Amino acid sequence: MPIIKKKQKQLSPVRTLTLSLLCVVLVGTLLLWLPISSKEGKWTDMIDCLFTAVSASCVTGISLYNTFSYWTMFGQTVILLLMQIGGLGLVTIVTFFNFAMGRKIGLIKANAVVGDVSVNGFAGSKRLFTRIVGYTLGMELAGAAIMALTFVPEYGAYGVFAAIFMAVSSFCNAGFDVMGEAGPTAYSDKPQVLIVMMLLIFLGGIGFVVWDNLANYRKTKRLLMHTKLVLAMSGIMLILGFLIYLIVSIIYREHFSDMSAGELVLSSAFSSFSARTAGFSIADMPTANDFAKLGTILLMFIGAAPGSTAGGLKVTTLAILIATVAAVIKGRDDASLLGHRVHKRLIYKAVTVLVLSVGFMIIAFAAIYLINPEMPEVDILYEVVSAFTTTGFSTGVSAQAGIATKLILCFTMFVGRVGPVSMLLTLTAGKTETEKDKVLPDCEILIG
């Protein structure tokens, strides 16, 4: 009698990746919980370990403890590995090693992966993944080598590890630092360190596709529209951020009285780069006053490029939304960018990401405010946006929060890193649409 094998139901690629990231978080939590991870040699509170592991693996950077003074070298190494996995992307690492070992990856999974990091489709995925790892390690090692020239004389042998840690944290837009109690502020007079960090933050934030396109420009003599748009929008956002923080430093001059004009300019530029989801705070510029907080909230929400180590709404999504608004104002049926028509499918995705992102942050803000009504509303909003966009700036809400608030922020960081659309797909994967081919009549609705 023939044996009929039941076809096993496989997890969808999106659900697989979400669960994989969750496993990484849980492993990191357990390792940070061990006494060997803290310099006091004690078991750290489990919720705090979970919060730190989520913050590191989601490359957020909101810290409950000073990374340099609280965690041992073992604990710092755990955080370093979590940042690298979260920044490079668990899916990219797994896929790269599959290719490196000659294993085949399913077409559906490969297309899901490429959808995150490429605009060229499945054909170039193997080459792209190989280069992603090569570019990442090359940039991080180059940045670490330069920063080691400053850190080694100051910290000795530990300076080598500190340089690697800061290079990975900067490139992955993670926001954790081992620069002592003062953090990056202690290096406001050392442009060689801050400039390297700024470059790494920028390179990590423009995305894998842009690196690959720029690296091959000498051969192809062609820049993808995606590359042009990312570079243009990134430049605009950096200038906008620089002006916001420069204005803050001028108006609020007494708060930065110990800094020279040159240091203020450098700090304003650094804060602008950092606000695009890196989260390194220098001279408290991003939280100096409510104007700085609101400006930072805007920059954090927009974020950097898709397929990068950064989070946020993404600059390309913003560009599509602006183009759509411009098309409506001009009475046109189609939106256009850089001389190209924007497909309706992209507009639907951009609007979906915007609505889901804003909706989720409103829910998280309301939940935390109801639990902590004594906290300033602006500070709560700041913390929620920072968590969702995986930036890492903090007004102290996380440090003062109870267990419920920390868990809400953990979930907010996780959703922000996975993406609200991917999270919903994870929760609804496997459900079929029964009315997919049903033709519906057009509707006429008054708007505006």
Image: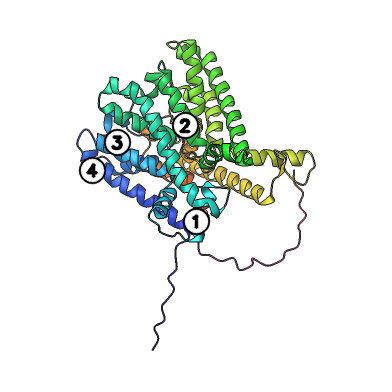
Foreground mark, 4 or 3, reads 3
Specify the quadrant that holds the N terminus.
bottom left
Across and down, in percent, residue 348 comes to 65, 50
Ranked by sequence position, the earlier of labels 1 and 3 is: 3
Q: Is the Cβ of the residue at disc 1 closer than 8 Å to that at disc 3?
A: no
Which amino acid type corresponds to the residue marked 4 in the rendered image? Leu
Relative side of 176 to 357, left or right: left
Q: Residue furthest right?
A: 331
Q: Which residues are magenta?
A: 426-442
First reached walking from the N terminus: tag 4 or tag 3 = 4
Question: Residue 300 — which label?
Answer: none
> Separation of disc 1 and disc 3 at Cα?
33 Å
Badge 1 amino acid: Ala
- Calculate the distance from the C-alpha at mark 2 to the C-alpha at mark 4: 31 Å
How far apart marks 1 and 4 lie (CA) works out to 37 Å
Q: Are marks 4 and 3 in contact (CB under 8 Å)?
A: no
Mark carried by residue 76 = 3
- State whether residue 365 is above or below residue 9: above
Which amino acid type corresponds to the residue marked 2 in the rendered image?
Ile
Q: Amino acid at mark 3?
A: Gln
Residue 201 is tagged as 2
Q: Earlier in the sequence, mark 2 or mark 4?
A: 4
Secondary element under disc 4, as helix, strand or loop, is: loop
Residue 77, picture quadrant: top left
Furthest toward the left, the residue is 41
Front residue of 361/432: it is 432
Residue named by callout 4 = 34
Q: Residues within 10 Å of mark 3 (few under 14, many from 20)?
A: many
Of tags 2 and 3, the one toward the viewer is 2
Q: Which residue ends up furthest to the front in the rendered image? A: 219
- When asked about the image quadrant of residue 156, the answer is top left
Circles 2 and 1, Cβ within 8 Å, touching? The answer is no
